[in-house]
Amino acid sequence: MSGMRRAPRPMPPPGATAVASSPWILISIGVGAMVVLLVIAVGAYRGPGTDYDPTPPLGAVPPPHATSAGWGASGLPSQPVPGLSPRRTDPPAPTGTAGLPVPSPSAGQPSYPSRPTYAAPEVSSPPPAARPPAAPASPIQARYRVTDTFDGGFIAELLIRNTSRRDQEWVARIEYPGGRVVTAWLEGVPQGSFREGGGILTYRSGPDLAAGSAVALRFHIEFASPRPARCVVSGRTCDGL
């Protein structure tokens, strides 16, 4: 072993020895390359020219970050630009499912003719029932008067006259509320018939009263007013009350 020689090591080139002994040389070269690239990038960037208009053209859609960068909700700058008229900020018209504008409730509605109104047919009321012709006035007339008064009673008279041209029968009804009829009679002619009840005197003639003649009916009344509550002869009210 002692008799063998070692082969001599090859010598590195002079530049490699310098690089290996000084690593900062590589770092300086890298930094210099980065500076050169930065200068080239800055030179390639161009700023906006004098004809630059920040207002987007009509129909242009602002970028998504425009709102946070100063754009309003309508897509226009929040600050007015001199020389530009303000734009309308009305919300867009709603669109339907097919992308067409939805008409307003009052616009574009077809007009329909109003429904005709039908009046109910007028029902004519039936003509009033024909009234029977009024009965002719009774030709018997009567006039009431008091002929005599005394304590507790009086004597009254009905002068009954037939104004027709033929003989007539008659019926007299005189009412004295609370009174009492004592008796009744005819003067100078045949007597008729009478009944009394509750202060009411009803006298019916005997023979018919001749045409144009008169007869006196007299009666005695007690406990009543000389003025009767009702006096009727053959349907006609007595005169003199």
Image (cartoon, rainbow, N blue to C red):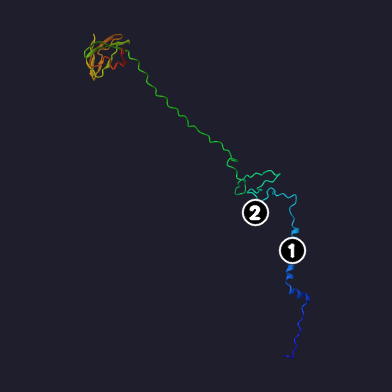
**Rendered-image quadrant of the C terminus:** top left
- In this picture, is 98 found above or below 156? below
Q: Closer to the observer: label 2 or label 1?
A: 1
The CA span between labels 2 and 1 is 32 Å
The quarter holding residue 237 reads top left
Rendering coords of residue 114 (x, y %): 55, 36
Residue at image location 75% in from the left, 61% down from the top = 39
Rendering coords of residue 41 (x, y %): 74, 60
Look at mark 1 in the image and give the residue it sits on: 35
Depth order, front residue of 174/91: 91
Q: Secondary structure at mark 1?
A: helix
Q: Would residue 72 appear left or right of 213 to someone viewing this image?
A: right
Of the numbered discs 2 and 1, the one sitting upstream in the chain is 1
Which amino acid lies under the numbered mark 2 shown in the image of this protein?
His
Which amino acid lies under the numbered mark 1 shown in the image of this protein?
Val
Rendering coords of residue 152 (x, y %): 21, 14
Depth order, front residue of 179/210: 179
Residue at image location 74% in from the left, 59% down from the top = 42
Look at mark 2 in the image and give the residue it sits on: 65
**Rendered-image quadrant of the N terminus:** bottom right
Few, some or many C-alpha atoms within 10 Å of disc 2 (few <14, some 14-19, many ≥20)?
A: few
Depth order, front residue of 157/95: 95
Q: Would residue 221 appear left or right of 54 to someone viewing this image?
A: left
Q: Secondary structure at mark 2?
A: helix
- In this picture, is 30 found above or below 148? below
Residue at image location 73% in from the left, 66% down from the top = 31
